[in-house]
Image (tube, grey):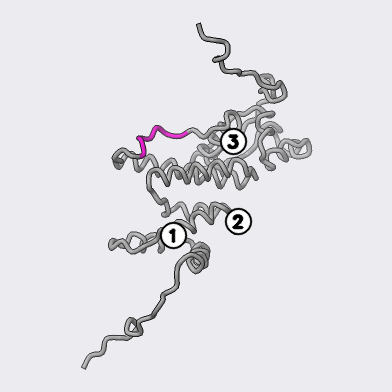
Amino acid sequence: MVSPSRLEDIRVVAVKAIDPTDQIIKLFCGIGKKAKDTKTVTVHQGVLCSGSSGFFKNAMKPEWMAQRDDPYTINLVDDPLEAVKLYVNFLYFKTLPTPDLPHKDEKRSEVTLRKIQGYLSVLARAYVFGEKILDIKFKNVVIQSFQTITRDYKVLPMKGFASLIYGGTPAGSPARRLFVDYVAYCACSDGKGAWHDVIETLPSEMLVDVTKRMIEVRPTLARHCSGNYNEEETD
């Protein structure tokens, strides 16, 4: 018999509990390139409005609801399904579902690397979605998870990710600063030209930010060898 003192107290204040009779809100999300490629995510109205999203709180105001054909349906066809699902899960459980990944110290296969990259892609899109719906708490949780994955598995996702972040966030965004720091601190000559390839794919706006950041964090040359800048002379 389990001692009462060891039982977890699962009580919650009534005002914080989910009301099963609450109105269901439908979120139409995009799952493809065509306008008709949509899927519906459902969420209780009280849960949707319990988060810190200014977007959804405004969307559920009577004056906004009156402008929609179905007041209890919100069109998110421009937003990826996986990002919206991640957000709804966060609203209900305050967690972010993560794929089953091997321990960070285990040898990684190509399949594992693709799985990691795929999940990071979902997180990047989730951050952009959080930017759209004005939910700072969600963005902070997503960016923390993103950093944990990249640190634990020693991956630096740049190609495609930088364009995604810069295309969906404003100047000064913490996510932009993170990607700028990735380059400013980690870019190096590895003899394989990998970073050269990455730099060529970065958005021009990011290249400006990276240059400014490098000026701040990289040491200046103590001495310049003038011979480094001479052309080879031929007789």
On the image, numbered disc 3 is attached to which residue? Answer: 28
On the image, which quarter does residue 40 sit in?
top right
Residue 192 placement (x, y as % from top left):
28, 61
Dominant secondary structure, magenta: loop
Disc 3 secondary structure class: strand
Q: Earlier in the sequence, mark 3 or mark 2?
A: 3
On the image, numbered disc 2 is attached to which residue? Answer: 170
Residue 216 placement (x, y as % from top left):
51, 66
In magenta, the rendered stretch is: 98-104
Residue plotted at (45% across, 69% down): 219
Disc 2 secondary structure class: loop
For the residues labelled 1 and 3, say whether their Cβ atoms are less than 8 Å apart: no
Going by the numbered disc 2, the residue's amino acid type is Pro
Residue plotted at (41% across, 75% down): 221
Q: Earlier in the sequence, mark 2 or mark 1?
A: 2
Q: Which numbered tag is attached to residue 185?
A: 1
Residue plotted at (47% across, 46% down): 147
